[in-house]
Image: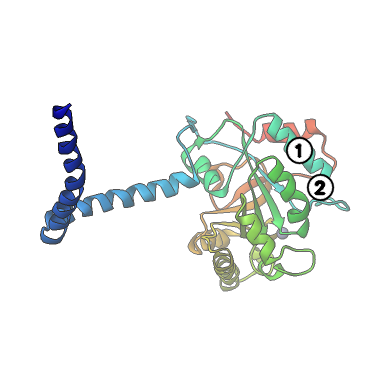
Amino acid sequence: MGKYRVLWMVALLGILILPGCSQGILEGIGTRTAPPNAEDDIVVVEAAENGEGQEVEGKIDTEDWITAESDVQRPILMYHSISEGNRLRVPREEFRSQMAWLRENGYYTLSPEEAFLVLTENRMPSEKCVWLTFDDGYTDNFTEAYPILKENDMKATVFMIGKSIDKGHHLTENQMMEMSGNGISIESHTINHLELNRMTAEQQEAEMVQSKGLFDRILDQDTTVLSYPVGRYNEVTLRLSEEAGYKMAVTTEPRGASREQGMHALHRVRISPGLSDGGFASLIENASNH
Ligand SMILES: [Zn+2]
C-alpha cells in the first residue's frame, strides 16, 4: 500500500506542477524568439488560401460535377410576371406545375455563378440543369414565384429595372434583399428599361454602369449579369456590357444558351402561358444538348 501511496503522490505532483511549467516554457518562447512567428506566418498563409478556396467552393461545390466533351447548351428559361392577363404572364398554378415537373424529373436550377461555369467550362452539376430567370422584377415574383421556388428548394434570377425599385407593381428594396439572401439572385435590367440599340454608346454605357453600381450597392454584391430590355442590342452593346463589368448578358432570342452565341448574347427560352407539362418538357429537352 505504501508503494502505491508514493506513486499517487508523484502523479499528483506531476499534475500540479506540469501545467505551470509548460505555460512558463510557452510564454518564454513566445516572448523571446522569432522562429515561431515565421511558423505562424506559414499557418496564416495556409489558412488564407484555404479560406479563399472555401469561399469559392462554399458558393459552388463543384466536386461532384460532370464534364462534357464539347460545348454545353442548356436552357435559360425566361419568365416575366407570375399572374394572368397577357402573353407575358404565366399563371401561378402553371408555374407551380412547371417547377414540380422540374423537380420530379431531377432538374437542377443554376445560380448565375454556376451557369457561367457550365457555359464557359462545360462542367455541370447534372446533365439536367436549367437557369430560371424573371425579367422586370414584378411584385408577384416575390409574392407568387418566390414561395414556390422556396418550397422546391430552387434557385432563380430576377432582372430588376433600377428605376422601378419600390414603385407600383415592382419589387421593393426589402423584397429584393430577402430574395437575394435566399437563392434568388437580383441582377440588372438597366435603369430605365429602354431599347439599348436605339441609344448612343454613352447612353448605353450609363444604363449599364449606373444599374450595376446601384445593385452592387443595395445588395452588397458584384452584379454580374445584364438582361437587355426587350432583348434589343447591337454590336456596341456587346462590348459595353463586358466593359461595364458584366460576365454575361441575356437576350430574348429563342434557343438554348451556349458559349458560341457569345457570353453577352445568350439566348433564352420564353415561357408563355397555356403550356402543358408535355409542351414545357419538350421546350427544355429541345434546348439541351448531350
Ligand atoms: Zn423587360
Q: Which residue is mark 1?
A: 98
Q: Residue furthest front?
A: 2
Residue 42 or residue 27, whichever sits in front: 27
* Rendered-image quadrant of the N terminus: top left
Where residue 60 appears, as percent x and y from the top left, is 49, 43
**Res. 90 mark:** 2
Give, as a three-letter code, the residue at label 1.
Gln
Height in image: 118 above or below 164?
above
- Look at 51% across and 60% down and name the residue there: 222
Snapshot colouring: rainbow
- Look at 53% across and 44% down and name the residue there: 114
- Report whether the residue tagged 1 is closer than 8 Å to ligand 1: no
Q: Residues within 10 Å of mark 2 (few under 14, many from 20)?
A: many
- Write down which quadrant ligand 1 falls in: bottom right
Where residue 57 appears, as percent x and y from the top left, is 44, 44
- Look at 70% across and 68% down and name the residue there: 165
State the separation of the CA atoms marked 1 and 2: 10 Å
For residue 180, what is the image quadrant?
Answer: bottom right
Q: Residues within 10 Å of mark 1 (few under 14, many from 20)?
A: some
Whichever of callouts 1 and 2 sits on the residue coming sooner in the sequence is: 2
Residue 102 or residue 119, whichever sits in front: 102
Secondary structure, mark 2, is: loop
Left or right: residue 151 compared with residue 117: right
Pointers 1 and 2 in contact (C-beta within 8 Å): yes
For residue 289, what is the image quadrant?
Answer: top right
Secondary structure, mark 1, is: helix
**Res. 252 mark:** none
Give, as a three-letter code, the residue at label 2.
Val
Where residue 225 appears, as percent x and y from the top left, is 57, 56
